Amino acid sequence: MVEPTPSAWVRRFAPLIRPGGRVLDLAAGAGRHTRLLLDMRFRVTAVDRDIAELRPLAGATCEIRAIDLEAGAPESALTPLGDDYDGIVVTNYLHRPLFAAIAAMLMPEGVLIYETFAAGNERFGRPRNPDFLLRPGELLEAFAALTILAFEQGEVTRPRPSVIQRIAAIAGPLGRLPMPVDLNHGAVSA
């Protein structure tokens, strides 16, 4: 089985997370970003409702947690995870009531990397339900209390045609930006 490739957006902004820092991979799915973060030597907490595919990643630097993020109040769903994360990664998942709690879990200078489907995606396939599609500019509004490093919304062709919205933000003032990444060869000089 071919493992899914990590998001280029996550790969681009993950280097901004404090080296060796504590990172939350929220709605981690099969663990494509958990693997990337572990390879980057972060301490990772990977969370999903179904952790079957995450279990093999558990170890000294990776805690796996089975949590239904949509059960109960948003604060109670995330409370068992603690706070003070140096980074939080969320991809292909949307549960709006968690937005405020996610931002509050970041340490000062913690980095949020969020990428998911947006309105217009219904033309390409699932998800089609507007409850699972971001409205134009919604991530900017939801995380306005953070310092926005980058924001994009629109159509993409990889990994499949879809409409997405993505944001990279920091809990604190502007700082250094990551080196541009050539996805085939690694970092390139700016």
Image: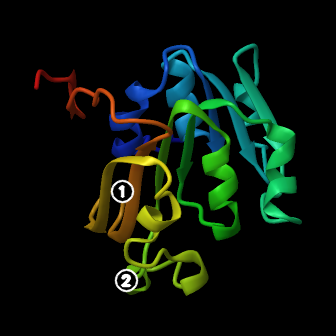
Which quadrant does the C terminus fall into? top left
Of the residues tagged 1 and 2, which is closer to the observer?
Answer: 2
Q: Provide residue 173's location: percent of width, then percent of height.
A: 39, 35
Q: Judge whether 75 appears above or below 157 on screen.
A: above
C-alpha separation, residue under disc 1 versus residue under disc 2: 17 Å
Q: Circles 1 and 2: CB distance less than 8 Å?
A: no
Q: Provide residue 76's location: percent of width, then percent of height.
A: 87, 55
Q: Residue at x 53, y 33 (%)?
A: 110
Which quadrant does the N terminus fall into? top right
At label 2, counting other C-alpha atoms closer than 10 Å, the crowd grade (few under 14, some 14-19, many 20 or more) is many
Depth check: give the residue in front, 96 or 27: 96
Q: Which residue is mark 2?
A: 120
- Relative side of 20 to 14, left or right: right
Q: Residue at x 34, y 43 (%)?
A: 8
Q: Amino acid at mark 2?
A: Gly
- Relative side of 163 to 133, left or right: left
Q: Residue at x 41, y 41 (%)?
A: 10
The answer to whether residue 18 is visible is: yes
Q: Amino acid at mark 1?
A: Pro
Q: Which residue is mark 1?
A: 159
Q: Provide residue 78's location: percent of width, then percent of height.
A: 79, 49
SS under mark 1: loop
